[in-house]
Amino acid sequence: MIRLRQVALVARDLDAVVGELCEHLGLTVCFHDPGVAAFGLRNALMVIGDQFLEVVSPTQPGTTAGRLLDKRIGDGGYMAIYEVDDLDRREAQLAANGVRVVWRGDFDDIRGRHLHPADVGGAIVSLDQPVPNGAWRWGGPAWQAHQDNSVVSAIAGVVVGAADPTAMCERWRQCELAHGARFQPATDRGEGIDEIELVASDRSRAGETLRLCGVRITLV
């Protein structure tokens, strides 16, 4: 099993961007994870159904997030985090395909692996296996599924910009990562997550688009 469980955006001004997301998408912040300080970041997480939209912001120089902000000249998509139930098998397969793991987290209630973006392309990708299935440590101790469903009810997928969309799509498929992802030609900002597709609670609003945190938000 693999499913897109969390999408992270990166922003210079965390509070302003989170405020806009909450206002336009009917969301509330469920958690600020102190653990991201180890990466030189602070963050905020919002629940969409039983999935999560995260915004991170660098708090010190020299972070991966800060370099991405400089490279893409502004806020944008940062990370796609997948829930899996067979992490060991997938990690072995990724190694066989030359994909390096840049971070390993092993806790009683979840194990996570961040993949080297140069080996995958388009975004930082993480594979995480919670215990039990469906739990999600990163959302904090008190999150509740489907608590803010007035505007959107799920994350349908992401759209990743690539210099060679066909080649990147094939690479993600080779690594069994393409679930919930589509690929399109890169914009002048380069490769990266350019769009998040969210399921509209009011079906009459399907097709609406917003521009928030440097990405296109499409209601589907």
Image (cartoon, rainbow, N blue to C red):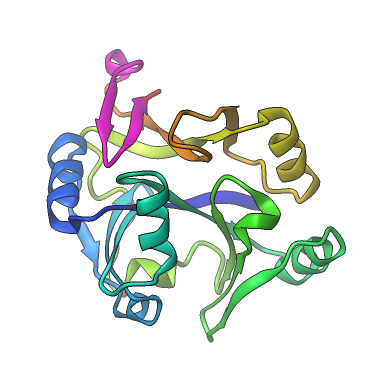
Asked if 81 appears above or below 197 in the picture, the reply is below
**Residue 51 seen by the camera:** no
Asked if 100 appears above or below 107 in the picture, the reply is above
Q: Residue furthest right?
A: 96
The picture quadrant where one finds residue 105 is bottom right
Identified at 27% across, 53% down, the residue is: 11
Identified at 77% across, 37% down, the residue is: 170
Magenta stretch encompasses residue 205:
yes
Name the one closer to the observer, 121 or 67: 67
Asked if 154 appears above or below 217 in the picture, the reply is below
Relative image position of residue 33 (x, y in whole percent): 30, 73
Name the one closer to the observer, 128 or 194: 194
Identified at 70% across, 56% down, the residue is: 119
Name the one closer to the observer, 59 or 218: 59
Start and end of the magenta stretch? 203-218
Relative image position of residue 3 (x, y in whole percent): 58, 49
The picture quadrant where one finds residue 102 is bottom right
Q: How many discs appear?
A: 0
Asked if 210 appears above or below 26 in the picture, the reply is above
Relative image position of residue 18 (x, y in whole percent): 19, 51
Magenta stretch encompasses residue 156:
no
**Residue 34 seen by the camera:** yes
Name the one closer to the observer, 43 or 83: 43
Is the C terminus in the top left, top right, bottom left or bottom right quadrant? top left
In-image side of 69 versus 129 (left or right): left
